[in-house]
Amino acid sequence: MKANEVRDLSEDQLEAKLIELKKEQFNLRFQKATGQLENTTRARQIRRDIARLLTIQGERQATAAKSS
């Protein structure tokens, strides 16, 4: 997921995507612990996508606080 794609999302969509990615991250960690994880690079992609979402969410909050 690119930063431009994330910026196009609304606040509700951003929250929903964040919840979805955290659930997927949990499932990947569970698979890793049980030895069933096949695509190890997906965990890295998920972690980075979550960080990207949180960064943009923080930017929006900072902008909203600055304009208030």
Image (cartoon, grey):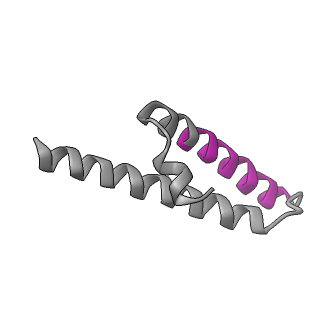
Closest to the observer: 68 or 4? 4
Residue lying at 65% horizontally and 42% vertically, measured from the top left = 23
Q: In the current view of this chain or complex, which residue is farthest to the top?
A: 12
Q: Picture quarter containing residue 50?
A: bottom right
Residue lying at 10% horizontally and 41% vertically, measured from the top left = 68
The quarter in which the N terminus is drawn is: bottom right
> Percent x, y for residue 25?
66, 52
> Percent x, y for residue 17?
57, 40
Tell me if 46 is positioned left or right of 32 in this view.
Answer: left
Q: Is residue 19 magenta?
A: yes
Residue lying at 80% horizontally and 67% vertically, measured from the top left = 40
| Rendered position, 47 above or below 66 | below
Magenta stretch bounds: 18-34
- Determine the main secondary structure of the stretch shown in magenta: helix
Residue lying at 58% horizontally and 58% vertically, measured from the top left = 49
Q: Picture quarter containing residue 29?
A: bottom right
Closest to the observer: 4 or 31? 4
> Percent x, y for residue 34?
84, 56
Closest to the observer: 51 or 67? 67
Tell me if 50 is positioned left or right of 38 in this view.
Answer: left
> Percent x, y for residue 63?
22, 50
**Badge count:** 0
| Rendered position, 9 above or below 4 | above
| Rendered position, 66 above or below 23 | below
